[in-house]
Image (cartoon, grey):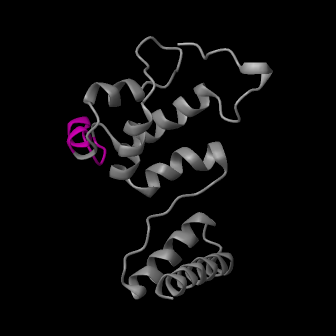
């Protein structure tokens, strides 16, 4: 399946084939024999048809079996499979990160934020502490503005 022609010779930052490859690789790590989930479990949990999942797991976007996942299916898979799955797609393509949103409990929020920050910076705890502190400060500011 070839990409549509670029308008005015403007190319997207992320190619269709690169996106398809990262999505397929991430799906293959989470779904299948010996993996965390079966296709059927993900179909039920995420609400995405099994055939759509199987087609997205094909590595080559030019393969006749490959089908693009609609946005709502990809987002449903990301919601079901979690931040680790989302990171496997967006980190190499967009140089960005994802982490689960913290719970409403402030203690759990601080711990989960710190864990996510450590994961995002590759274990550099000093950098992770700064990132977590900035994130928590932002959350506190939002809470104060909402309370005012």
At horizontal 36% and vertical 44% (from top left) the residue drawn is 77
In this picture, residue 79 sits left or right of residue 98: left
Number of labels in the image equals 0
Q: Nearer the viewer, residue 57 or 140?
A: 140
The quarter holding residue 128 reads: bottom right
In this picture, residue 27 sits left or right of residue 34: right
The answer to whether 142 is drawn above or below residue 60 in the figure is below
At horizontal 73% and vertical 20% (from top left) the residue drawn is 7
Where residue 146 appears, as percent x and y from the top left, is 49, 81
Where residue 41 appears, as percent x and y from the top left, is 21, 42
Q: Residue reaching furthest front?
A: 148
Where residue 53 appears, as percent x and y from the top left, is 34, 31
Bounds of the magenta span? 34-44
In this picture, residue 120 sits left or right of residue 101: right
Q: Nearer the viewer, residue 144 or 32?
A: 144
At horizontal 29% and vertical 48% (from top left) the residue drawn is 36
The answer to whether 39 is drawn above or below residue 141 in the figure is above
The answer to whether 143 is drawn above or below residue 88 in the figure is below
At horizontal 32% and vertical 40% (from top left) the residue drawn is 31
The quarter holding residue 120 reads: bottom right
Q: Residue reaching furthest right?
A: 9
The quarter holding residue 119 reads: bottom right
Q: Is residue 45 magenta?
A: no
Where residue 20 appears, as percent x and y from the top left, is 52, 29
Q: Is residue 35 magenta?
A: yes
């Amino acid at each position: 399946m070839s990409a549509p022609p670029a308008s005015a010779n403007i190319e997207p930052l992320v190619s269709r084939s690169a996106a398809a490859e990262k999505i397929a690789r991430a799906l293959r790590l989470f779904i299948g024999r010996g993996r965390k989930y079966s296709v059927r479990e993900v179909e039920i949990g995420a609400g995405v048809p099994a055939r759509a999942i199987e087609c997205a797991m094909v590595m080559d976007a030019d393969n006749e079996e490959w089908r693009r996942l609609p946005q709502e299916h990809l987002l449903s898979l990301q919601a079901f499979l979690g931040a680790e799955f989302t990171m496997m797609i967006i980190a190499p393509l967009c140089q960005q990160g994802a982490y689960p949103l913290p719970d409403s409990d402030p203690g759990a929020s601080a711990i989960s934020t710190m864990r996510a920050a450590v994961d995002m910076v590759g274990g550099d705890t000093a950098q992770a502490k700064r990132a977590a502190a900035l994130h928590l400060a932002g959350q506190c500011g939002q809470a104060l503005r909402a309370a005012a």
